[in-house]
Amino acid sequence: MVTLYRPGNGPWHRLPAGPKTALLLLVVLGVCLLPATWWAAAVMAAVCLACYALPGAGLRELGRQLVTVRWIVGLTLAGQLVFLGPESAAANTARVAVACALAALLALTTPATELLETIERAMQPLALLRIDPQRAALTLSVTLSTLPVLAGLARDVREAQRARGGGRSLRHFAMPFLVMALKHADQLGEALVARGVR
Amino acid sequence: MSGVAPGVAPGTAPGIALQGVHVRLGDTDVLRDVTLSLEARTIAVVGENGSGKSTLARLLSGLVAAGDGTVRVLGLDPVRQAAELRRRVAVIFSNPDAQIVMPTVAEDVAFSLRTEKLPRAEKAERVAAALDRFGLAELADRSSHDLSGGQKQLLALCGAFVRRPDLVVADEPTAYLDARNARRVADHLLADASHRLVLVTHDLRLAQRCETAVLVQDGTVTQVGDPAQVIATYEAGIRW
Ligand SMILES: Nc1ncnc2c1ncn2[C@@H]1O[C@H](COP(=O)(O)OP(=O)(O)OP(=O)(O)O)[C@@H](O)[C@H]1O
Ligand SMILES: [Mg+2]
């Protein structure tokens, strides 16, 4: 699920959103450029541990984040093991896991509003393409905060199905879910307009 | 500017005026020939399911346009003066989930101020004061989607009131709430004299607390006046 900001005052929290995003992006980029070897995997893991070891984040949080992305990590690992062998698999999986964990670290230590402003600034060049950066960033943040609602709708539909003795039919799930999701989108759209978004 | 005069004196500032209004959605005439002039500060809207109450509320909030006739809300044309209307009119829906846009409580309230040109510190101050007033201060950093239904609706109110609206349009704001939360939400809506209120509700006791009531029947307004009388007509007209 989407990681959320956790208030705190460790070094990651104190670092302004802009430089923090840039720094973490650089680290992720570095991690991506490392070769697929055992020692590289170890370096990636060490970098990630070091980032989370700072006060305000914590290794327990790292554990929680890795649990959330376990499916992605598991799939990557399985696929790579089959096709590339253990060394590459370890390194590439570490890459993916570290990238996810560092992205989460950003979201965990930056309030959404600040993140939004940073994204807005980063998207300024889009204005040249006639895309309004403010709108683009807003779309992104609204999408993120809509995910829990959609997950809730999906749960409701599944439960209603089970209550009526239905099985796990995708077709019987998809219809009501789509209708509810679209209805939610409609209502959300009106609420956004009512709250001053044009 | 919005909210300059706390305690609007009804009668001096223009309220709501509809003249021969028709609204067509899809291929149904949802509102037909509605003519209304309302100066009361708190207005209840009652009527059966499907009678057109929500459509009336959305019309007043500029979310649907009239196909015919003229609409004036606080003296504004909701379509042609949409931006000004947005600044002065807040809307509350019954489903709190659909009104929350930001991941945490405080940020969701702050979202309402993002288009206002205020210094950062003042925005923060207003957000804090609003959170405090709605009893949400302790939940400021909580995930907004993890709140209970009642808390979410209080958050929606908070997000609406932080903008200091001159008119609040609320469409069944207490529909999903238990008695206590419904009471709290209603008290917030009714107690504050700094804004006008249009309250669509099926809770007739709540409608009684307004100064005026409007009865909507089958797409048109059939009675306006003292809530007790309007409710009596409404109940007498129900064929059980
Ligand atoms: N987007 C739409 N397209 C077509 N018809 C619509 C649309 N929205 C509402 N209607 C119809 O307009 C009529 C009035 O709807 P409205 O939602 O205003 O009723 P209401 O008085 O709020 O009812 P309730 O008490 O159930 O909320 C209904 O018959 C409804 O089916
Ligand atoms: Mg309705």
Image: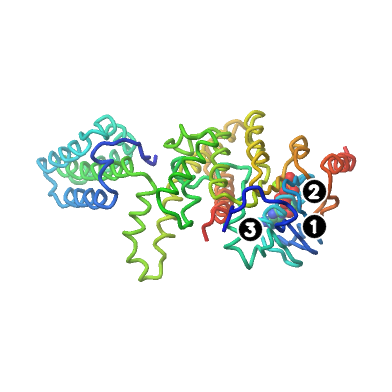
Q: Position of residue A136 (x, y in %)?
A: 41, 59
Q: Give the Cα separation between the discs numbered 1 and 3.
A: 19 Å
Foreground residue among B126 and A93 = B126
Q: Is residue B67 above or below residue A72?
A: below
Disc 2, SS = strand
Foreground residue among A177 and B120 = B120
The mark lying in front, picked from 2 and 3, is: 2
Q: Do the residues labelled 2 and 1 touch (CB within 8 Å)?
A: yes
Residue A26 falls left or right of residue B153: left
Chain that bears disc 1:
B
Q: Quadrant of the C terminus of chain B?
A: top right
Q: Is residue A159 above or below residue B51?
A: above
Foreground residue among B96 and A66 = B96
Q: Residues within 10 Å of mark 1 (few under 14, many from 20)?
A: some
Q: Quadrant of the N terminus of chain B?
A: bottom right
Disc 1, SS = strand
Q: Give the Cα separation between the discs numbered 2 and 1.
A: 9 Å
Q: Label 3 amino acid?
A: Leu
Residue B120 falls left or right of residue A36: right
Number of callouts: 3
Residue B63: numbered disc? 3
Chain that bears disc 2:
B
Badge 2 or badge 1: first in the primary sequence? 1
Q: How crowded is mark 2: few (under 14 residues within 10 Å), some or many (20 or more)?
A: many
Of all residues shown, which one is farthest toward the left? A39
Residue A32: numbered disc? none
Q: In which quarter of the image is residue A69?
A: top left
Q: Where is residue A2 in the image (x, y as percent from the top left)?
A: 39, 41
Residue B36: numbered disc? 1
Residue B214: numbered disc? 2
